[in-house]
């Protein structure tokens, strides 16, 4: 394969599953050149090897960050201070502090609130017969839920959402200076919010994080700034693309859609299958901390390796009929939230809950829902990290009213 996997243009029509199927068949790992890395990088396409690298944090580190540069003049732009960029023991201590305010109980307590948000989003298009699934539905739920969780006032949200799109958005026309300016403004906003919460704590995540303490240590203002930025961005991308590509996939597999409509209790396993089949985060990188090997291939200290989650989730060594859809697939040990180890996605529980409640509402309320386009012709986000549509038109016959018991 000659595709430049670091080039966002490679994914203009979606993840190249056919090429990666050939990679998995031909060999274990493969070497590619990169304009920013003198020694290039190794691509890991198979499920077992992705798991091994992900879990062996002593041999493979995240620092300075787990992202693959899309060009030769790569700058970290502060990403080295993100939680996802740190390694144990710093990562372990910081994650414990953050987890204290991001517990399953706190997330589960949001269920009724998320349900109301879901139906509010659908109500906003109920008087129409078509919309853009990305910008009219999928985009807004995770952005608002993260803002609700953190405690961003309604009147500030448009500005915070705009900063979010600029800092980690995938618009190729946005300059590095514009990204830096948006990041600085977001940090300033986070600092002001933290100062306010220290004076008057509330029942929100920022207040919980300010109060969190592990081994006598608390989060610094800089930690809080970077986590605020990471949460706004990472907290929205997976859910946005799960809703978009999940809906597309179900509409393209009417048999599975009918099964799910007949038995909504299948939603939890269906969501896992949609995450596996259409993996939102395509891959992350690691850097070897010492000479080692992967599947018999020698890896030198300092070499970069690319863990391809999207490829691993279609590996026929791990999944029967990997290119098909089975909403009852169990077990389903996919790697859409990471492949184990210290960096397993902190927001996985929230993403699953949002997906479950949104798909419940879509199944309940839309009648005659269908794609209003050929997905193969629709533009994707300009990214070598996220596999998602930038727009996806849908249409329907009618929208049923929201349940009356919403409080």
Image: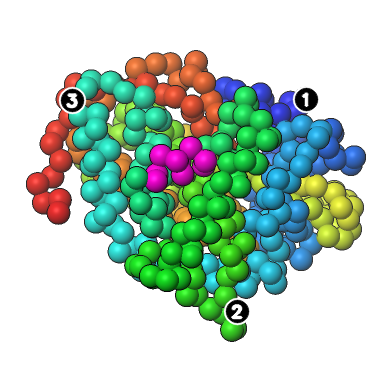
Residue depicted at x 58% and y 32%: 170
As measured in the structure, the alpha-carbon distance from the residue carrying label 1 to the one carrying label 2 is 49 Å
Q: Which mark is residue 189?
A: none
**Observer-nearest residue: 50 or 227?**
227
In screen coordinates, is 232 left or right of 15?
left
**Observer-nearest residue: 290 or 213?**
213
Task: Specify whether residue 159 is painted magenta.
Answer: yes
Q: Are marks 1 and 2 in contact (CB under 8 Å)?
A: no
As measured in the structure, the alpha-carbon distance from the residue carrying label 3 to the one carrying label 1 is 48 Å
**Observer-nearest residue: 98 or 68?**
98
Q: Which mark is residue 217?
A: 2
Question: Residue 216, position in %: x, y?
Answer: 59, 84
Determine which residue is flagged by label 1. 2
- Mark 2, secondary structure of its residue: loop
Looking at the rendered image, the quarter that the C terminus falls into is bottom left
Q: How is the image coloured?
A: rainbow
Looking at the rendered image, the quarter that the N terminus falls into is top right
Q: Are marks 3 and 2 in contact (CB under 8 Å)?
A: no
* Span highlighted in magenta in the image: 156-164
Determine which residue is flagged by label 3. 127
Residue depicted at x 58% and y 28%: 171
């Amino acid at each position: 394969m000659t595709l430049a996997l670091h080039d966002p243009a490679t994914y203009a029509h979606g993840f190249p599953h056919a090429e990666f199927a050939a990679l998995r068949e031909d060999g274990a790992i493969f070497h590619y050149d990169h304009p920013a890395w003198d020694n290039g990088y190794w691509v890991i396409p198979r499920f077992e090897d992705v798991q091994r690298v992900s879990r062996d944090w002593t041999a493979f580190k995240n620092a300075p960050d787990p992202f693959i540069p899309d060009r030769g003049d790569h700058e970290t732009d502060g990403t080295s201070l993100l939680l996802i960029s740190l390694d144990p023991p710093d990562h372990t201590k910081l994650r414990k502090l953050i987890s204290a305010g991001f517990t399953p109980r706190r997330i589960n307590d949001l269920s009724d609130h998320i349900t109301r948000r879901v139906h509010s989003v659908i109500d906003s298009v109920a008087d129409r017969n078509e919309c853009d699934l990305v910008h009219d539905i999928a985009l807004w739920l995770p952005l608002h839920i993260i803002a609700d969780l953190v405690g961003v006032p309604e009147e500030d949200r448009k500005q915070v959402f705009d900063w979010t799109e600029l800092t980690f958005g995938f618009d190729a026309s946005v300059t590095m200076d514009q990204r830096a300016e948006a990041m600085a403004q977001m940090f300033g906003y986070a600092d002001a919010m933290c100062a306010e919460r220290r004076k008057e704590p509330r029942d929100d995540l920022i207040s919980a994080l300010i109060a969190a303490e592990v081994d006598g240590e608390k989060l610094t203002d800089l930690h809080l700034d970077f986590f605020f930025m990471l949460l706004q961005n990472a907290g929205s991308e997976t859910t946005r693309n799960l809703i978009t590509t999940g809906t597309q996939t179900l509409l393209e597999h009417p048999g599975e859609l009918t099964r799910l409509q007949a038995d909504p209790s299948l939603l939890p396993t269906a969501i896992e299958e949609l995450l596996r089949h259409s993996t939102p985060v395509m891959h992350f990188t690691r850097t070897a901390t010492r000479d080692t090997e992967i599947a018999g291939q020698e890896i030198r200290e300092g070499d970069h390796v690319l863990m391809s989650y999207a490829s691993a989730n279609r590996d026929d060594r791990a999944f029967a009929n990997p290119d098909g859809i089975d909403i009852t697939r169990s077990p389903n040990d996919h790697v859409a939230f990471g492949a184990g180890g210290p960096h397993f996605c902190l927001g996985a529980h929230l993403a699953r809950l949002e997906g479950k409640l949104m798909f419940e509402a879509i199944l309940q309320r839309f009648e005659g829902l269908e794609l209003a386009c050929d997905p193969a012709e629709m533009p994707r986000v300009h990214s070598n990290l996220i596999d998602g549509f930038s727009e996806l038109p849908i249409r329907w016959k009618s929208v049923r009213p929201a349940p009356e018991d919403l409080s």
